Amino acid sequence: MDTLKYFLAGFVALFVGCSSNSQVAGNSAETGSPELAGVLMLNDGKPAAYAKVQCVPGNYNIIAASEAEQVLPSAFETETDENGNYEFDSIPSGNFSLEAFHQESGQMLLLQNLNAEEDEPLAVNDTLQGPGTVKLLVSGAFRENQSGEAIVIGTTIRRSVSVQNGKIVVDSLPADTFELVVYMDGMSPFGFKDVSVKPEETTVWGDSVTYTFKVPLALPEGIDSLGTVVSDFPLAIRLTEKEIAFDSAEVVNGRWEAVRISKDGNRSKKLPIAQTYFDASAKEAVFWVSVDSLNVSDSLELHFDNTMDPAYAKDVFPTNRSYSLVWHFDSGLEPVGDGAEKGYFAGLPTGVVPADGVVGKGAKLDEGDVIVAENSSAADSSRKVNLNYDGSGYFCFSVWVKLDNLEEKQTFFEKSKEYALRYDPEKGFVVDLWVPDSSSDSVKYAWLSGMSDIKAGEWVYVAFSRHTISQSNFYVNDRKIETEPEQIAWTGVRDIADFEVGGFTGTIDELMLGSCFRDEDWTRLTYLNQRPENYWPALSAR
C-alpha cells in the first residue's frame, strides 16, 4: 500500500453541527472549501471513478445494539467523480478511518488512525488495492465449518467467517494492518492484534510453526554400492511423533517442501513431493519424494511451514517413467485413489475395509471382496497409459501382501488372460503372463517363488519385472527368485476384462503397475524403503 500522505490544503474551516451526535471538525459551507479531499487511484494507474468513500469515527462500532446505530451519518459518505476526486465538507473530529470501495474492479482502501484537527483541512491521496484473505490459525477446539463473524475495530468492515481445515477464513479484506475481532457461534469474542493483509494475497496470521529435517540419501546399511544409478526413485518418508507434534492442528495445514543438498552445500530446485497419509491419532504421516538418484552421498532437506498453503506435486509417480497405476490405499476406499501422475485408474471396492498397511493404510479383503480398476478392460487412445499387456513389451509390478492362511490357493490380482499374481500352497507366489503367438499355440508363462519367506499373518513384498521372457526379475522381499518359468500352452483369445484385485483373504498395500523394466537395484531399494520395520531413510532434525 502506498505510504499515507497528509497535505494541509489551506482551507478555512468553520464550526457547524451535524445531524448525528458525533462531533465534526468544522464547516466549510461559507467558503465552499472541503475539510477532507483527495484523489483515489486504482492499482493500474487509472482513476478510481465512482468509488464509495466513507469517513468512520474512531468510536464507531459495527456490532451495535440496533441496525440504526450501525448506519453512518450521510455526511460521512460520498463518492468519487470520474477522475477519482472525492471531498467531505464535515468529518469527525479526533481519530477516524477512511474507507473506499470500487465496485467495478473490487479494489479497496483502508486508512486508519487519521486525525482531524479543528480548522486544519486534510488532503489524503492513495491507491486502492485488490482485497486479501486472512487465515487465522485455530486450535482443535474449533469444529470444521463452524461459522461466525469478524469485524475490524473502528471501521464498517464486517465479514462472515468459517473454520476450514483448521483455520478461520476471513475473505475480502482491504490491504492494511489492523485489529480483528472474531465472534464464533457459541464462543466468547476474541481478538487478533496487528493482522497484516497484503493486496491480492492469502496470508496466515498466528504462531508460526516450522520443521526442518535432514534425510540422508546414503544407501541402507549393508549395501556398499549399486550396480546401476537408480534414478527418479519415489522415496517414502515417514514422520512419527518423534519428529512432529501430531496433537497440534497447526501441522495438519501448511506446506511441505523438499530439496536436495549436495555434499558441498549446493541446493537443488524443489523436488516433487506428495503427502498421501496423515493420521493424528496414529501419529504418523507419509510423504513421497521423487529423487533423481540415490547412489550418492547427498541428503534431502524436508521443510514444513504452516503459514503457507499446501501444495503437492502430481508427478512423484510420473507417467513418462511408466507408472500406469499406483494404489497407496491411504486416502480411503471410496474409491481407491490412483496416485500415478495421470490418475486414470481409480479402484471401485466391494466389501473392502481399511486396515493397517506397510506404508500408511492398506486394504483388508475377504475371499469374495474385490477392487476393480475403472475403464481398464481396453486401451483408450486418449490416454497416455493403459493396463493392457500384449506380451511383447515391458511389464512390472510391486505389491505388499499379507495372507491370513496358507492352506488354500488364492489370487491377489489379475487381468484375465493377460497377467496375474497368485498363491499356491505347493508353489508359493506365482506370476502368470499370457503371451499370444500368431504362428503357433500361445503360451502362458508361470514364475514360481517357492515357499521360502512366506508366513501367514506377515507382510511379504512381491515384485516382478519382465524385459523378455529370458530377462526377468522376480523378488520376494529382498530375495531374488532364480528360476525358469513354466510354459503352458493355451488356445483361444484374451478375455476383455478390467484389472481386478481380489480372490484372497488378507491385506494388501502399495500396489504399483507399470510398462517398464525395473532392475535389481531398484527392486531391492523399494523393498528396503517400504518395509514395515527398520525405516530407511531415517530422519534427523536439521
Image (spheres, rainbow, N blue to C red):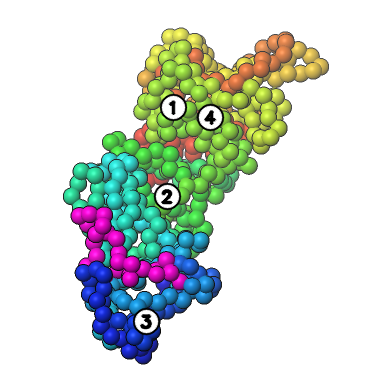
On residue 346, which mark appears? 4
> Exactly how many numbered labels are in the figure?
4
Q: Residues within 10 Å of mark 2 (few under 14, many from 20)?
A: some
Helix, strand or loop at label 3? It is: loop
Q: Is residue 257 left or right of residue 233?
A: left
Other residues around mark 1 within 10 Å, as few (<14) / some (14–19) / many (≥20) = some
Considering only order in the chain, which callout, 4 or 3, is on the residue closer to the N terminus?
3
Front residue of 377/30: it is: 30
Secondary structure under the numbered disc 2 in the rendered image: loop
Crowding near pointer 3: few (<14 within 10 Å), some, many (20+)? many
Query: Going from the N terminus, do you reach mark 3 or mark 2 first?
Result: 3
Residue mark closest to the camera, 3 vs 1: 3
Indicate which disc residue 34 carries: 3
Instruction: Give the mark toward the camera: 3 or 2.
Output: 3
Residue corresponding to mark 2: 310
**Residue 333: which disc?**
1
Disc 3/disc 1 C-alpha distance (Å): 68 Å
Residue at the spot 72% in from the left edge and 10% down from the top edge:
491
Residue 181 visible from this viewpoint: no
**Amino acid bearing label 4:** Ala
* Nearer-N-terminus badge (1/4): 1
Q: Give the percent coordinates (x, y) of residue 84.
A: 48, 74
